[in-house]
Amino acid sequence: MLQRVETIEALRAARKALSGRVGLVTTMGALHEGHHSLVAAACAENDAVIATIFVNPMQFAPNEDFAAYPRSMEQDLAALEKAGVEIVFTPTPDVIYPQGFQTFIDFEIVSKGLEGGHRPEHFKGVGTVVAKLFNLTQPDRAYFGQKDAQQVVVIRRMVRDLNFPLDIIVCPTVREADRLAKSSRNVYLNTEERQAATVLYRALRAAADAYEKGERLPATLRLVAREVLEAEPLAQIDYVAVNDPRSLIGLHDVTEQPMLLSMAVQIGKPRLLDNCLLPWSLNDSKGLTATLGA
């Protein structure tokens, strides 16, 4: 039976009662199939699983509406119980950040480009809360999704630099039937925008096809993806980038090493993210875990 805990003391007591290998899935709730895939992987590979549901105010910029973030606690709890999760931690902000809180996790290179360029304080908030959750839950493995590729690289950097004794497992992006990446933001798309949003996957595939035909120049791969995006009138491109998937340093020269192709595109209200590893064959859990941020 799922045990819901809301305080640090209750979480520590519940964690102490677990035995064997423990997996962790951190979420902000509003769970969709992408989250469920992480939970399923954690349940399959560990003796017990802890999930967290916490809408983290620290990773929201002043222009982002923290209060409007979708929440569906009862449905989320039911889904986690059905999946076989043992403990779910659902703290309030004052539990995670008590009065006088003043210690933060910050990053250098890995947090500065891509999403870090658009949301400069975002990864400070992500790193701080994830460090706290790792410390509180003491997992053997933690599960994250490919769709938030930069987050994976940032967290792996933190795990190495601060010597957290756990493994980071990366699961592939879960997609709709038309290949749009699952995201809580998708609910904000109207019918026309929803159809237009499939352009992100088509852009990734176009670059992947070029790669498979022998193209290795990052600028050309970016251009191939951008041209597909530009053909969609509703797509407002924020960036299309090709980076080293381990360091997130931008790539410019021809290379046979793996590449991370990332994009952020505004369609209607939501800003949509998607990415893939090149070559395409690396976009499974084995390839992602071995490559992304490794």
Image (cartoon, grey):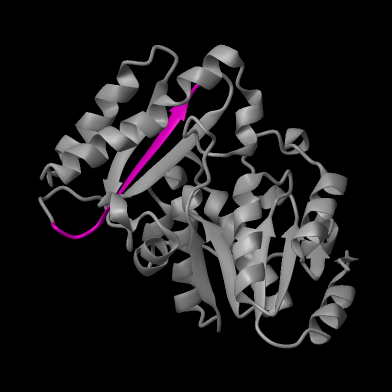
Q: Is residue 38 above or below residue 206?
A: below
User: For the point 45% across and 44% down, which residue is it?
Assistant: 115
Q: Which residues are magenta?
A: 256-267
Quarter of the figure with the C terminus: bottom left
Q: Is residue 65 left or right of residue 259?
A: right
The mark total stands at: 0
Residue 200 included in the magenta stretch of the image: no
Instruction: Give the percent coordinates (x, y) of residue 46.
Output: 64, 77
Q: Is residue 146 left or right of residue 227?
A: right
Instruction: Give the percent coordinates (x, y) of residue 228.
Output: 29, 23
Q: Quadrant of residue 42?
A: bottom right
Q: Is residue 98 visible?
A: no
Quarter of the figure with the N terminus: bottom right
User: For the point 63% across and 46% down, which residue is it?
Assistant: 33
**Which one is nearer the viewer's eye here, 215 or 107?**
215
User: For the point 13% across and 47% down, which residue is it?
Assistant: 216
